[in-house]
Image (cartoon, helix red, strand yellow):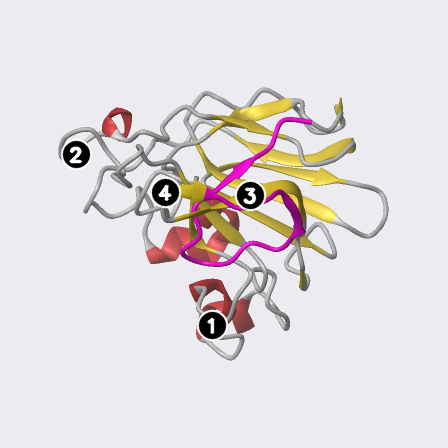
Amino acid sequence: MFVHDGHDLYAHHRRLDITGGMTTHFGITGNLMRYAHDFVVTDDKGKLFRTDGATPGDWYGYGTPVFASGDRVVRDMRDGMPDNRKGAPPPFDQAALMKDLRLFLGNHVLVDHGNGEYSLYAHLKQGSVAVKPGQRVARGEQLGAMGMSGDAFLVHLHYQLQSGPGFEEGLPAYFEGMRVRIGDSWSAPFDGPVDSGMVVEAVAP
C-alpha cells in the first residue's frame, strides 16, 4: 500500500485554507483533514493501474475492501455517487458543493467511536457501502470498498480521524503492526504514524 499523503508536513491535507470562501461559508475554523491519509494500492513495481487507468476498474485498488478501524456506531454514510474517470471533473459543480460540502467526500462512512473521536472513510466505490446510520460495527468489519467518487482524482481511500461529526479539527492517527518497504526488504513491525511516500503493509496479528 502506497501512502500518497500521510501524517507529515508534505501532505496536501495540511494546507487547507480556512480563510477561503468555501470554508468561511460553512463556518469551518479548523483543519478537519490535518492528519488525513490517502492510501493507494499498487502492484509490486509501484504502478497504480494495469493499462492506462482510463476506467476505475483498471486501477489495482478499485474494489479493495475497506474495514472499520475501531468499534462503535455508524454516524453517517452516503452511497450512489458515480466513480470518476481519470482526468475528468467530478459529477457536481461549485454551486452544488456550496449547498452540500459532503459531496466532496463522495461515497463515505463516518463512525462515532464514542470518545470524542470519529473516523471517516471517503471516496468509496459506488454501491459498495455496507452499513447504515445507527448500525453498530466492530473493528475489522467491512464498511465498503476503495473507489474514486466525490472529488477524487485517483482510486484511493481517504482516511481521517476528527474530533466531531461535522467539520471539526482533525486528530492524529496511529497504526498498529505496520511495516515499511525499504529497498528490497521490509522493516520490523512498528506502531505509530505513517508518512507520505511510504510503502506499507499491515502484519497479520
| Kind of element beneath mark 1 | helix
Residue, far right = 115
Query: Upstream in the sequence, badge 4 or badge 2?
Result: 2
Amino acid type of the residue tagged 4 in the rendering: Asp
Amino acid type of the residue tagged 1 in the rendering: Arg
Q: Closer to the camera: disc 1 or disc 3?
A: 3
Name the residue that disc number 4 marks.
184
Query: Upstream in the sequence, badge 1 or badge 3?
Result: 1
Q: Do residues under tags 4 and 3 come within 8 Å of each other at their CB atoms?
A: no
Q: Position of residue 61 (x, y in %)?
A: 37, 31
Whether residue 41 is visible to the viewer of this picture, yes or no, is yes
- Relative side of 15 to 138, left or right: left
Q: Closer to the camera: disc 3 or disc 2?
A: 3
Q: Position of residue 17 (x, y in %)?
A: 48, 75
Residue 189 part of the magenta segment: yes
Residue 179 marker: 3
- Relative side of 124 to 85, left or right: right
Q: Residue at x 49, y 28 (%)?
A: 79
Give 187 or 30, whichever is nearer the viewer.
187
Q: Residue at x 85, y 43 (%)?
A: 114
Query: Upstream in the sequence, badge 4 or badge 1?
Result: 1
The residues tagged by marks 1 and 2 sit, at their Cα atoms, a distance apart of: 29 Å
Image: magenta residue range: 186-205
Residue 15 marker: 1
Name the residue that disc number 2 marks.
54
The residues tagged by marks 1 and 3 sit, at their Cα atoms, a distance apart of: 27 Å
Against 31, is 114 above or below? above
Give 101 or 119, whichever is nearer the viewer.
119
Query: Upstream in the sequence, badge 1 or badge 2?
Result: 1
| Kind of element beneath mark 4 | loop
